[in-house]
């Protein structure tokens, strides 16, 4: 008998984007989608087509460009939403429409003001409608873990009869406890007469820190699709972290006895890309992808590890993409060495891009004795941001500061049509002066809500990475910039946030109209 497979469903681009402060441009979503494809996820939920024109466009583009995985769009259980979702995914090689509707008494009473019969009818009608467009239809009774089991069983049976090919049981509010959630899935598997006609899925939130545990308990009970996000991003405390779910299934295959299609060596690269684009740092002690995940500090452990790795390591760090930093590049390294190193890190560049990267690499190696993998990743992230920057590019930044001077910045930007614009302004400190000058040129009133600098590697010559969070009319925009000079990195980060804001909000600034 063929081994059972668990379908890995990634919703970083949909639920993940619902994290407070995580708006993404279509370009950024495409980059994440391509990386998820390399990782080998089975389903990418690319967005919620009816929620905004930007979301619709992102889903449409991903459906067009990313051919191997199933591409899904979320839709509320109403005809207009289902039609929009169908329209957005219709260019996909493997499209899916994902219809959802609340099922708990709490949501029915307070949010929807509908009774169970009305809800059942809406679910069935819209699953049928979705099936007219697409063979692959998923249905989710939202807040399933707080739904009475009798009604839940009825909904699951009815939507399968209406044509749903996957039924997802969401713990939308993160309320479930593993044993009890597993029992709920087991009851569905045992009591729904047509359950074998669909895949049972779970979607767990992390409000009590149990999303991964609940997902794994569900697999033990018969669920064969897990939904989650890279780095556990998502609404509130986030969704089940897919890297943890995947390594849990892999490491304890003896217990789960199921396989999946994931290339685990891509996990770290995927985590870094998502962290970089979201502007959410990964905590040091985070399982699998945190900086300390495979570091041993105790002497007794170190001694044992040297004798035999498995004494204190249940996973091989290389299996999730960590590699030892044996080779360090420097000033004398050539193009071929750089190319080989970048390929090991998962960057496959065209000749033209490699030439460009080689120039930036040489400039960095001039300033910095040793160029490590982390430096290269920061450099690639900087290049990615620069190529995304379609609106304003940083041309020059100069700051005068010191104990007896009023910090003054001069900034020159280049607009997308090649014009130069410069301004000068003073501030409370050099970074403040830079941000005020950029704001003056661009003409956007956005408050700097958060500012942080961290060094990418050790040493005073390290590359500094700046993260800035801008508050624009109550919405958050993250920008990042990297440079050996932290004031230059600050200017790049601020401008990156402004560029992302402009392309997501679609606003035409006074400055853009003026020149
Ligand atoms: Mn969710």
Image (spheres, rainbow, N blue to C red):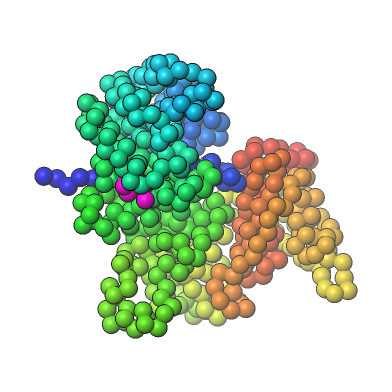
Magenta stretch, overall SS:
helix
Q: Quadrant of residue 170?
A: top left
Pick the quarter of the image with the N terminus. top left
Residue at 63%, 71% (x, y): give it: 484
Q: Which residues are magenta?
A: 213-217
Residue at 39%, 67% (x, y): give it: 322
Q: Is residue 93 above or below residue 124?
A: below
Number of numbered callouts drawn: 0
Pick the quarter of the image with the C terminus. top right
Residue 331 in magenta stretch: no
Residue at 65%, 37% (x, y): give it: 506
Image location (x, y in percent) of residue 434: 76, 59
Q: Is residue 226 above or below residue 73?
A: below
Q: Is residue 366 visible?
A: no
Q: Residue furthest left?
A: 1
Residue at 24%, 29% (x, y): give it: 191
- Name the residue nearer the viewer: 330 or 305: 305
- Name the residue nearer the viewer: 180 or 152: 180
- Name the residue nearer the viewer: 507 or 212: 212
Q: Is residue 336 left or right of residue 508?
A: left
Image location (x, y in percent) of residue 115: 45, 17
Q: Is residue 469 left or right of residue 96?
A: right
Image location (x, y in percent) of residue 331: 52, 79
Q: Is residue 265 visible?
A: yes
Q: Is residue 499 left or right of residue 41?
A: right
Image location (x, y in percent) of residue 60: 46, 33
């Amino acid at each position: 008998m063929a081994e059972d497979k668990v379908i890995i469903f990634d919703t970083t681009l949909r639920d993940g984007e619902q994290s407070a402060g995580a708006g993404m441009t279509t370009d950024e979503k495409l980059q994440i989608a391509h990386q998820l494809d390399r990782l080998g996820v089975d389903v990418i939920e690319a967005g919620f087509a009816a929620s905004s024109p930007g979301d619709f466009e992102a889903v449409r583009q991903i459906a067009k460009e990313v051919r191997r995985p199933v591409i899904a769009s979320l839709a509320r259980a109403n005809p207009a939403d289902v039609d929009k979702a169908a329209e957005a995914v219709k260019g996909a090689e493997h499209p899916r429409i994902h219809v959802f509707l609340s099922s708990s008494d709490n949501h029915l009473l307070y949010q929807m003001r509908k009774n169970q019969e009305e809800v059942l009818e809406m679910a069935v009608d819209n699953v049928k409608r979705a099936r007219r467009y697409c063979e692959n239809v998923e249905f989710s009774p939202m807040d399933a873990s707080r739904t009475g089991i009798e009604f839940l069983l009825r909904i699951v049976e009815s939507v399968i009869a209406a044509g749903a090919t996957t039924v997802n049981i969401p713990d939308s509010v993160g309320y479930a406890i593993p044993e009890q959630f597993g029992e709920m899935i087991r009851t569905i598997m045992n009591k729904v007469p047509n359950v074998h006609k669909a895949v049972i899925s779970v979607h767990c939130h992390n409000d009590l820190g149990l999303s991964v545990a609940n997902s794994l308990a569900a697999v033990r009970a018969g669920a064969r699709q897990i939904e989650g996000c890279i780095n556990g991003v998502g609404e509130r405390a986030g969704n089940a972290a897919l890297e943890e779910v995947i390594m849990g299934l892999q490491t304890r295959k003896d217990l789960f006895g199921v396989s999946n299609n994931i290339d685990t060596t891509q996990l770290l690269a995927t985590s870094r890309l998502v962290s970089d684009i979201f502007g959410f740092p990964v905590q040091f002690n985070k399982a699998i992808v945190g900086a300390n995940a495979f570091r041993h500090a105790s002497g007794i452990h170190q001694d044992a590890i040297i004798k035999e790795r498995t004494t204190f390591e249940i996973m091989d760090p290389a299996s999730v993409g960590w590699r030892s930093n044996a080779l360090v590049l420097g000033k004398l390294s050539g193009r071929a060495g750089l190319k080989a190193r970048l390929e090991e890190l998962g960057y496959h560049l065209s000749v033209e891009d490699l030439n460009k990267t080689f120039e930036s690499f040489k400039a960095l190696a001039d300033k910095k004795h040793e160029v490590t993998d982390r430096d290269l990743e920061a450099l690639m992230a900087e290049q990615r941001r620069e190529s995304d920057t379609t609106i304003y590019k940083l041309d020059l930044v100069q700051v005068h500061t010191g104990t007896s001077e009023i910090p003054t910045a001069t900034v020159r930007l280049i607009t997308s049509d090649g014009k130069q614009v410069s301004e000068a302004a003073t501030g409370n400190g050099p970074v403040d002066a830079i941000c005020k000058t950029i704001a003056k040129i661009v003409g956007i009133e956005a408050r700097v809500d958060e500012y942080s600098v961290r060094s990418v590697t050790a040493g005073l010559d390290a590359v500094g990475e700046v993260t800035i969070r801008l508050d624009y009319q109550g919405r958050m925009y993250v920008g990042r910039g990297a440079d050996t000079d932290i004031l230059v990195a600050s200017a790049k980060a601020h401008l990156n946030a402004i560029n992302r804001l402009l392309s997501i909000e679609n606003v035409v600034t006074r400055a853009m109209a003026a020149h």
